[in-house]
């Protein structure tokens, strides 16, 4: 559903343009700008190979003590693993700061696209005057579209706090998705009054149960960034719990949209694991199931092959007695005590044709911990997209 500026937080504006970074003429440069320096928080990739914009964004957040004016985002080139990455990131940030009459440390860069290809900073520098001139409170959706790469649709989500404070988020991501602190690119803006420390605390908690419970293919990007800006334009101070709950709502919606739009995907898959000793144990089991190519292809083919589910759980590295395991698919029990349960395969196959798949694995015993992971099926489309991504 298309959202208007009335649904968006006060004091932010947005702009997009085609700078020539992409091979095709589609908007590839975007700005998210706060009217005044906003409290800022972000989490980034933990990949050992880190893109230059991530390094600079971390540095600027630290130098500015969590106060930022804008995110400068480009699609089509990751600006990672290149000879000029650091210089390009700094050139683009300095040019944006000049155009916005802001400090360079108040500009945070983010990039997405092909790794290992040199990026021409002058494309961004030349496009910035036009980009800044076109800033508008109504261009939120345009930014959500401009940051897409292999996504088939934009991802946006919205929330309200006490009916007065507004929050809006956008994300891009369809492949190279498995979190280590963050996943893909995600940007959330709110007009709540909050300090950088309060934002960071809320983001850390919200990420743990949303974006860090997401996987498409088990690959962690070099550019992963999820960020929040709070400019206080509403004049309303909200509680830490209210801020966390709203942020969690927005990020959960975005995470599920990313999983549903996984490269080549036809089905959103939710995996619940219950009865583990710890949350970490439950999450490891759920993630092993979610990342199993055999599980994901079985779901793609609507094959009720629960044996692949218990096998993936078994190699997760978490010890459990298979005799204590029950498994449900689409609400039907397919495994009881580690053995086949009686169920109608024809009925379950039909239910597996639905656009959402639900797998629940229960370890019966003393464990009380549980975890949920979102993923998608694997189809031939994933191979087609990634086999020709650079060409």
Image (cartoon, grey):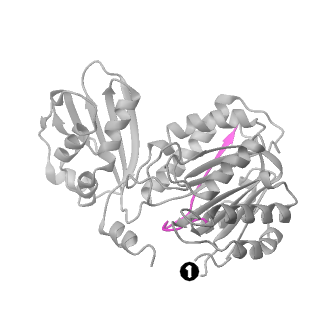
Q: Which residues are magenta?
A: 147-161
Write the residue at 33% across / 49% down: 291
Write the residue at 76% across / 72% down: 125
Q: Which residue is mark 1?
A: 23
Quadrant location of the C terminus in the rendered image:
bottom left
Image check: 43 left or right of 373?
right
In depth, the one of 78 and 24 nearer the eye is 78
Image check: 315 left or right of 84?
left
Residue at the far top: name it. 366
Image check: 140 left or right of 344?
right
Indicate the position of residue 162 as horizontal and vertical percent values: 71, 36
Q: Is residue 164 above or below residue 13?
A: above
Residue at the far right: name it. 101
Residue 123 visible to the viewer: yes
Quadrant location of the N terminus in the rendered image:
bottom right
In depth, the one of 337 and 385 nearer the eye is 385
Q: Is residue 301 above or below residue 43?
A: below
Count up the numbered dots: 1
Q: For the residue labelled by badge 1, is the local secondary structure a helix, a strand or a loop?
A: loop
Write the residue at 56% across / 46% down: 251
Q: Is residue 44 above or below residue 260?
A: above
Indicate the position of residue 267 as horizontal and vertical percent values: 36, 57
In depth, the one of 46 and 186 nearer the eye is 46
Indicate the position of residue 26 as horizontal and vertical percent values: 61, 77
Residue 167 visible to the viewer: no
Within 10 angstroms of label 1, few (less than 14), some, or many (20 or more) residues?
few
């Amino acid at each position: 559903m298309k959202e208007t500026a009335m649904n968006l937080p006060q004091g932010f504006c947005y702009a997009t343009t085609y700078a020539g970074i992409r091979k095709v003429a589609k908007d590839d440069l975007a700005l998210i700008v706060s009217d005044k320096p906003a409290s800022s928080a972000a989490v980034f990739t933990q990949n050992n190979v880190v893109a230059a914009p991530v390094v600079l964004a971390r540095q600027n957040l630290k130098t500015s003590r969590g106060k930022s004016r804008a995110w400068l985002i480009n699609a089509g080139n990751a600006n990672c693993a290149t000879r000029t990455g650091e210089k390009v990131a700094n050139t683009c940030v300095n040019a944006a700061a000049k155009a916005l009459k802001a400090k360079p440390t108040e500009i945070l860069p983010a990039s997405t696209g092909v790794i290992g290809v040199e990026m021409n900073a002058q494309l961004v520098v030349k496009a910035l005057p036009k980009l800044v001139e076109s800033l508008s409170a109504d261009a939120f959706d345009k930014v959500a579209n401009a940051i897409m790469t292999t996504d088939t649709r934009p991802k946006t989500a919205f929330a309200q706090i006490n009916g007065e404070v507004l929050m809006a988020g956008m994300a891009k991501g369809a492949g190279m998705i498995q979190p280590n602190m963050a996943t893909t690119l995600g940007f959330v803006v709110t007009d709540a009054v909050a300090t950088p420390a309060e934002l960071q605390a809320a983001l850390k908690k919200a990420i743990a149960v949303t974006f860090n419970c997401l996987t498409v293919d088990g690959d962690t990007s070099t550019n992963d960034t999820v960020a929040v800006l709070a400019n206080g334009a509403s004049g309303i101070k909200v509680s830490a719990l209210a801020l966390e709950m709203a942020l969690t709502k927005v990020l959960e919606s975005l995470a599920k949209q990313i999983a549903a739009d996984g490269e080549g995907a036809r089905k959103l898959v939710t995996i619940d694991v219950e009865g583990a000793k710890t949350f970490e144990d439950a999450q490891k089991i759920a993630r092993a199931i979610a990342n199993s190519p055999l599980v994901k292809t079985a779901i793609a083919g609507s094959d009720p092959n629960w044996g692949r589910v218990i096998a993936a759980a078994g190699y997760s590295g978490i010890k459990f007695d298979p005799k204590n395991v029950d498994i449900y698919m689409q609400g039907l029990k397919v495994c009881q005590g580690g053995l086949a349960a009686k169920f109608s395969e024809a009925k379950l196959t039909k239910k597996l044709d639905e656009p959402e798949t639900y797998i629940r694995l229960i370890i019966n015993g003393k464990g009380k911990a549980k975890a949920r992971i979102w993923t998608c099926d694997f189809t031939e489309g994933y191979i087609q997209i990634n086999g020709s991504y650079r060409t």
